[in-house]
Amino acid sequence: MQYLQELEHFFQEVELPVIISDEYISAFSKENPPISLDFIEKIIPWEKDVDEFTEFIPCFRLPNQKNFIGFVYWKGGLLSYDFILATIDFKGTSIMHKSIAGTRVSDDGSITISIASIDTDLSIKIMIGRSTDGIHYSGEDSKSYYMEVLENGEITIPFQET
């Protein structure tokens, strides 16, 4: 399909392993212009809660896979910033999409920050920390989760490290 070629243009392939955190959004935004609303409707139609404050920035595409195309984009809105991993088949049909890293500010002022690392075997480790004052993070409140992108493009549900 035509827009799959556009997807390859917007999302450059990256070599794994890769770390994803808010610290890298400025690098992604320098290399990749924001995605137009028209293109969002074509390539990421599951994004329905879009308003004039929402911005999408392409980050990267996973190395070539046999059964799917995987890519990560950043979705920025008011008080919520997410790096979303999405997988689609070669016809452009969505397989799955999950937030794997980002920042959220709660109504009570607490901030939750998560970072992710995608390894060469497509396993994903996610670290999550929370601050009640926006400055100090407690290790007691930190959690780690694991996900995996399967051969068919499905993304496993996160499970907490025990």
Image (cartoon, rainbow, N blue to C red):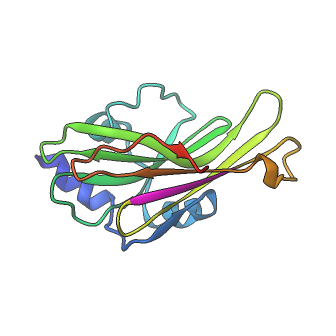
- 78 lies above or below 86: above
| Residue displayed at 15% across by 59% down | 66
Q: Is residue 126 magenta-colored?
A: yes
Q: Most prominent secondary structure in the magenta stretch?
A: strand
Residue 158 location in percent, x, y? 49, 43
Residue 117 location in percent, x, y? 51, 62
Q: How many marks?
A: 0
Q: Nearer the viewer, residue 162 or 96?
A: 162
Q: Choose top left, top right, bottom left or bottom right for residue 130.
A: top right
User: Residues in magenta?
Assistant: 123-128
Q: Is residue 113 magenta-colored?
A: no
| Left or right of 36, for residue 127 | right
Q: Choose top left, top right, bottom left or bottom right for residue 14.
A: bottom left
- 51 lies above or below 126: above
| Residue displayed at 19% across by 47% down | 3
Residue 82 location in percent, x, y? 55, 44
